[in-house]
Amino acid sequence: MDLAHISILALAEQYLSFIETVREKRIEIAADYLVMAAWLAYLKSRLMVPQAPSDEEPSGEMMAALLQFRLKRLEAMRHAANQLMNRPRLGLQVYQRGMPEPITVQRTNLWEASLYDLLKAYATQRERSIPQDYQLFERTVWSLQEARDILKRLIGESMDWVPLDAYLSQYLTTPEQRVTAMASSFASSLELVRQGHVELRQTLAFGPLLLRRRPGDRKDET
Amino acid sequence: MADETLDEVEHYEIAERNLRIAEALLFASAEPLSRDDLATYLSEGADVPALMAVLEERYAGRGVTLVRRGDKWAFRTAEDLGFLLRREEQETRALSRAALETLSIIAYHQPATRAEVEEVRGVQTGKGTLDLLMEAGWVKMRGRRRTPGRPVTYGTTDAFLDHFGLETLADLPGLEELKGAGLLSSRLPPAMQVPLPFDGPLRDDEDPLDPDDIFGEDDTEETA
Amino acid sequence: MADETLDEVEHYEIAERNLRIAEALLFASAEPLSRDDLATYLSEGADVPALMAVLEERYAGRGVTLVRRGDKWAFRTAEDLGFLLRREEQETRALSRAALETLSIIAYHQPATRAEVEEVRGVQTGKGTLDLLMEAGWVKMRGRRRTPGRPVTYGTTDAFLDHFGLETLADLPGLEELKGAGLLSSRLPPAMQVPLPFDGPLRDDEDPLDPDDIFGEDDTEETA
């Protein structure tokens, strides 16, 4: 069938009557068929009614030519598909090696990770383990009495000058503790000095605060 | 003089060794191998295409021949022996007409979007059809057309060339006639410049695929 | 005379054709082929062993050779090129998140048992992860914790320090440094501590590994 020579009008008539018979048999008609039918019905009307000069729609002839082109192109694609399928195809007429000898690659992995990755992984996990629900911020504060007791226990019997930091070092692990321990124990130490239990000395500005039991002070005295 | 001869001998030996290695690798593999696949095993700076030309000549007319498939090479049984070797039991599942048409439209009009395939076919193409062609390994998603909706563009694969025994897309049957008749164009009247099927890198009007495309194969944007 | 020559030519052509067919058959076959397998496709009365002898000679010294397997024939890659098909490759791969996490916990909390690692991670640690870290040479089994079940304790190796550019474990940043680097947020519970890792000799609560541990790496006792 040479599509170039078929009468578009006849084709439209034929198709529309086909759709009509199918519809009578109450068969489900695919949307595509209906679209085609509608399009052909429109084309038929364009072909039958002469083109008005003011009409901006494409002429019936142009639409017919376009339809013809599209049918020809589709036919060409169908023909091409046939030609493709008739070629000597792999696994049908042409064969690949039946006993391939695959290249086996022995892979040894060199693992790669940076210190940053490692630390990030650790920090992320530690943070993840912190309970997410809101907690009242608990302030760890040393009361003056607490500081005084600890200070006295730390100083003990020592008669040597010792920096306050050294005494407190075991309490200074977290920054919050450091601040409160320093503040409270410094205040307490001043109180202890006033009561005559300890001596306090600082040899230079911002130097370490040195602390010792005051000679002659009895330990059990408070 | 003696040195020259020695050089020649050495050169010849290296070439022969490369040929043996390439021969072994191509023979061992069921799939076509690229220049890079081969070069890894050959002597430094080996001229792969030249070696392939020698091999092709050596195997010309034999029962097994060296063929080029896109940028790759493979040993395949000679085409003319097909009728003899045809295996009865290997009855491939016949492709549906829809799949056949879609395949040829993509082959001849690539890169093509689904909408373009549908335009040529005149009917909607089910997603299943494209999936089937991709599963067969003949069609792949290339990129996204730089037009509203950014539809996915499809093209054929090296496996397509291999399966249909084509060296390049230029060997597609009837390509010249189709081009001459303007049937590769999407418009009427045939455009002045008739596009040819193209399976090279992305075109000017194509974007690379989105990262999601590789996993999802979701092309809802075309229907949206 | 003329007839004789014609006969010879014809004979030669038939033989060549048989060779081509045998070549293609042997190439395409998934297993070695016997005389009968081949004869089916060859000209009536073809001398299969003679044909095989010709083929064998033609392929002698090539990358592919015809070999006899019992009373069957097959093409195989030349034996001296077998190394091509068995390649060793070193691949650099990034450590998975699970492995990184496990490694970092072992680094900080060592000596640590698997249960202790899991406690920090909040998820189970596959045996594969620990195996991988040991294979990488970064983690080793130190001993067994002197607690019920005697779980294996893990620690880091010198290779670990080497890879991460640490002189000693003490170079692992502490809490303040982690915060300073922005790795830990500053809003942390005050009780949070970063332990001081220990990679010295066995601790008081550690026993040496059992003799079996070195071979078996069996730590079922942890799950028991």
Image: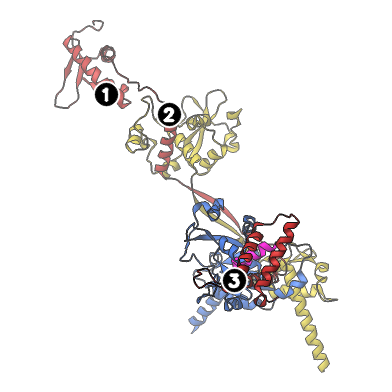
Chain colours: A red, B blue, C yellow
- On residue A130, which mark appears? 2
Residue C219 in picture, x, y percent from top left:
58, 32
Who's the residue at 56% across and 52% down the image?
B218
Going from N to C along the chain, the mark reached first, 2 or 3, is 3
Q: Identify the image quadrant of the C terminus of chain C.
A: top right
- Name the residue carrying label 3: A49
> Does residue B100 belong to the magenta stretch?
yes
Question: Which of pointers 2 and 1 indicates the residue nearer the eye?
Answer: 2
- Name the residue carrying label 1: A179
Going from N to C along the chain, the mark reached first, 2 or 1, is 2
Residue C74 in picture, x, y percent from top left:
73, 66
Q: Main secondary structure of the magenta part?
A: helix
**Which kind of residue does numbered mark 2 sit on?**
Ile
Going from N to C along the chain, the mark reached first, 1 or 3, is 3
Residue B219 in picture, x, y percent from top left:
55, 54
Mark 1 and mark 3 residues within 8 Å of each other at the beta carbon? no
The local secondary structure at tag 3 comes to loop
| Parent chain of label 2 | A
Residue B36 seen from this side: yes
Above or below, B219 relative to B77: above
- On residue C218, which mark appears? none
Separation of disc 2 and disc 1 at Cα?
Answer: 23 Å
Q: Which residues are magenta?
A: B96-107
| Parent chain of label 3 | A
The local secondary structure at tag 1 comes to helix
Dot 3 surroundings within 10 Å: few (below 14), some, or many (20 or more)? few
Which image quadrant for residue A198?
top left
Above or below, C101 relative to B101: above
Above or below, B24 relative to B224: below
